[in-house]
Image: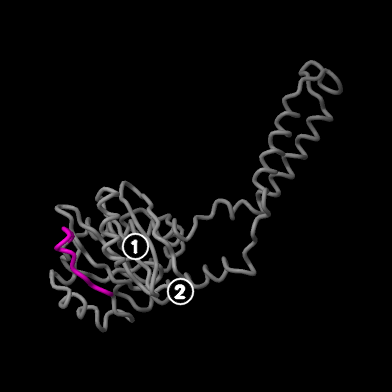
Amino acid sequence: MICREVLNFIDSYMDHELDLVRQLELEQHLKECSSCSRAYAERRSLQAAIKSAPLAFEAPAGLEQDVRRALRRAAGTNTSASAKGFFPRLGWNWTGWFAGAMSATAVAVALIGVGPRFLQPSLDDRLAQEVTSGHVRSLITNHLIDVVSTNQHVVKPWFNGRLDFSPSVRDFSDHGFPLTGGRLDYLAGRPVAALVYHRAAHPINLFTWPSPPGEDLKEKMLSRQGYHLIRWSHGGMTYWVVSDLNENELKDFAELVQK
């Protein structure tokens, strides 16, 4: 991709609307082009600012139940059989139909105002999709590892000068999860460290980058496209683990990282 195409596709990329081939091409360009990378970071910052308070609107408690009740009332009114009023042969109750239509309209107006808040994916959902895409991309483009080594004292220094933080790198060979290397990746609008481990023939990507100040998230398991993911944040760092490994063994690996 050239810069003009990347700038045209950035919004679609942020909304996860690109096909896999274009997504991979765009992400590769972002790694190589500092100008487009800055433009992408600015778009992400703008997106975050728009979604933050006081612009964000928190839907009132119980709104969903109120909307559902209003829809049921409207549906019940519309289907009531009456021979009164106009169109007697059709059995329409014109007054009831009009009231039902107005109720449905009011519900539609309410949904227009708050619907996007219900449909908007959570931060976990967005990051889970990015992490899964990063894992799949590393496998299908044969770019799983930039620095190949089972020695943590070789892998850790490799990131010096390539990132604005120093990732913690450990080898878990004694527990059946050998370190096989690391690489740079791009997630959450920034370069991140990707540490690569294996469990038999199953590659495991451990993504890590600095957390927002004060953030401390408990471990959470997710699944996307047949892959298992675990995320947590602690000690000023965010961690995402992803693999096609079974849930129990992936949890064992995540526990080793957190010790």
| Residue 175 within the magenta-colored segment of the rendering | yes
According to the picture, the residue beneath numbered tag 2 turns out to be: 212
Residue 253 on image: x %, y %: 26, 59
Residue 188's quadrant in the figure? bottom left
Residue 257 on image: x %, y %: 28, 65
| Residue 160 within the magenta-colored segment of the rendering | no
Position of the N terminus by quadrant: bottom left
**Residue lying farthest right?**
85
According to the picture, the residue beneath numbered tag 1 turns out to be: 240
Q: Which residues are magenta?
A: 168-177
- Kindly identify the amino acid type of the residue bearing the numbered disc 1: Trp
Residue 49's quadrant in the figure? bottom right
Q: Tell me the CA gap for discs 2 and 1.
A: 15 Å
Q: Secondary structure at mark 1?
A: strand
- Kindly identify the amino acid type of the residue bearing the numbered disc 2: Pro
Say above or below: 217 vs 132: below
Badge 2 or badge 1: first in the primary sequence: 2
How dense is the environment of label 2, judged by Cα within 10 Å: few (below 14), some, or many (20 and up)?
few
Say above or below: 136 vs 65: below
183 lies left or right of 110: left
Q: Secondary structure at mark 2?
A: loop
Residue at left offset 27%, top offset 74%: 168
Q: Main secondary structure of the magenta part?
A: loop
